[in-house]
Image (spheres, rainbow, N blue to C red):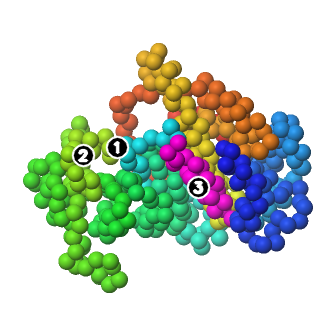
């Protein structure tokens, strides 16, 4: 948090992430830092209401001397800020989290376990966004604008390392490879069944990165032969698809890579086939892969928080710049929340000793508590220890039980109509 505070007030930040050289050079009521903090404060209501809350909170709680500004002034100022500023602030969190000195860092056998997946978000129906992302039709044949989000996510530490946005028809594999700059040695990346291909796995091997992914059972002769063999695990050679062009590829028609196939028999009677580059059966026995692949569920939980708790689709504007600002900012807020919650593991362990179920922080409520208080976390003159203590006490006061082995039938039909997920009665909006 101290590093973030230093970064926010640095001259380099505004110089690097303002759109034009002349932006924010005049002495205005809302300078670069004020505009940035306002966007970080989870804008989900009317801008007039948000501005009044923002100015009142900073002045009453922190005596910041912030001048009141209009909605129009903010809209003009936000156009001058590059959305990538929030990616940069996220990188500050990541850089200072993954250090040998961090006792809260969670690894699995020395591996950083990541998951990558894409999701669709619905955008405002404007001319600019229609031209940028294209128009799709739902089952009711209504034209809507949608985009595809791709996230690289640390499932053990609950941190989003990178986020990207493109057209809804963009290839998930291409989007996943855009996260390559975040890959590190001793990473294991887990993918769903939309990703397996020779070229995709080969890209990971060339970068020295291990991967694990689910594959369709009818996808190729290699998989069908493995299923017919009845084996639980097999190290074998995978060849590129012979029907595609090899022009410009880093491999030829005769190339091959070594992969390991894993058979998982689910309690439901279904069979799943996994492909992995973790070939050592002694170091990685077959029995661990069901649990290992299940860790991928963490990124599904992240998307649930992003859409239903942080309400990222409730955009605060209608331009492509605004959409990216809101999305990248929401990911930044999610990482802030994860860092704070991750520091409460010892306290939760003590609490859980006297309870029937293990408890965790209520994520939905925690985002509500971050509203306005995130300003104090990032405002350099605010007492950081006091703010942290207040948030930690609130988070620990509002915990919910972890009930394992619950099965909810997945309703896939709602996605055909592009409907919002149904909010159950026991979950109330916190933003």
Q: Quadrant of the N terminus?
A: top right
From the viewer's perspective, is 329 left or right of 414?
Answer: right
Q: Are marks 1 and 2 in contact (CB under 8 Å)?
A: yes
Q: Residues within 10 Å of mark 1 (few under 14, many from 20)?
A: few
**Label number found at residue 283:** 2
Q: Are marks 3 and 2 in contact (CB under 8 Å)?
A: no
In front: 13, or 45?
Answer: 13
Q: Residue furthest front?
A: 101
Q: Quadrant of residue 106?
A: top left
**Label number found at residue 214:** none
Q: Position of residue 196 (x, y in %)?
A: 31, 62
Q: Is residue 139 visible?
A: no
Local secondary structure at mark 2: loop
At 44% across and 58% down in the image, what residue appears? Answer: 184
**Span of residues in magenta:** 81-101
Kindly identify which residue carries mark 3: 91
Q: Position of residue 213 (x, y in %)?
A: 31, 55
In front: 425, or 101?
Answer: 101
In this rendering, the count of numbered labels is: 3
């Amino acid at each position: 948090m101290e590093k973030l505070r230093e970064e926010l007030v640095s001259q380099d930040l505004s110089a690097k992430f303002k759109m034009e050289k002349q932006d924010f050079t005049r002495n205005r009521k809302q300078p670069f830092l004020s505009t940035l903090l306002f966007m970080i404060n989870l804008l989900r209501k009317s801008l007039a209401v948000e501005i009044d809350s923002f100015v009142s909170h900073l002045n009453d709680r922190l005596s910041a001397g912030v001048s009141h500004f209009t909605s129009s002034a903010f809209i003009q100022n936000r156009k001058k800020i590059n959305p990538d500023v929030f990616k940069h602030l996220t990188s500050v969190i990541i850089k200072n989290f993954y250090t040998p000195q961090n006792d809260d860092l969670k690894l699995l056998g020395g591996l950083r376990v990541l998951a990558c997946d894409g999701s669709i978000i619905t955008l405002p129906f404007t001319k600019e966004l229609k031209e940028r992302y294209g128009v799709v039709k739902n089952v009711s044949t209504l034209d809507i604008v949608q985009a595809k989000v791709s996230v690289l996510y640390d499932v053990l530490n609950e941190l989003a390392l990178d986020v990207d946005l493109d057209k809804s028809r963009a290839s998930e594999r291409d989007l996943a490879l855009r996260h390559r700059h975040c890959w590190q040695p001793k990473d294991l990346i887990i993918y769903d069944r939309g990703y397996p291909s020779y070229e995709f796995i080969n890209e990971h091997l060339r970068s020295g990165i291990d991967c694990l992914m689910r594959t369709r059972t009818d996808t190729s002769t290699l998989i069908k032969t493995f299923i017919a063999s009845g084996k639980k695990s097999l190290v074998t050679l995978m060849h590129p698809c012979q029907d595609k062009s090899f022009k410009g590829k880093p491999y030829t028609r005769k190339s091959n890579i070594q992969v390991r196939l894993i058979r998982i028999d689910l309690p439901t009677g279904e069979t799943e086939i996994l492909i992995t580059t973790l070939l050592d059966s002694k170091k990685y026995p077959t029995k661990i892969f069901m649990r290992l692949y299940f860790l991928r569920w963490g990124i599904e939980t992240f998307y649930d928080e992003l859409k239903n708790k942080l309400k990222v689709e409730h955009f605060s504007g209608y331009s492509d710049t605004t959409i990216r600002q809101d999305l990248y900012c929401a990911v930044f807020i999610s990482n802030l929340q994860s860092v704070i919650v991750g520091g409460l593991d010892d306290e939760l362990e003590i609490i859980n000793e006297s309870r029937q179920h293990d408890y965790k922080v209520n994520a939905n409520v925690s985002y509500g508590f971050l509203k306005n208080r995130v300003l104090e976390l990032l405002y350099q003159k605010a007492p950081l220890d006091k703010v942290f203590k207040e948030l930690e006490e609130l988070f620990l006061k509002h915990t919910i039980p972890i009930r394992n082995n619950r099965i909810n039938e997945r309703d896939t039909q709602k996605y055909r109509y592009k409907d919002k997920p149904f909010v159950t009665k026991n979950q109330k909006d916190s933003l």
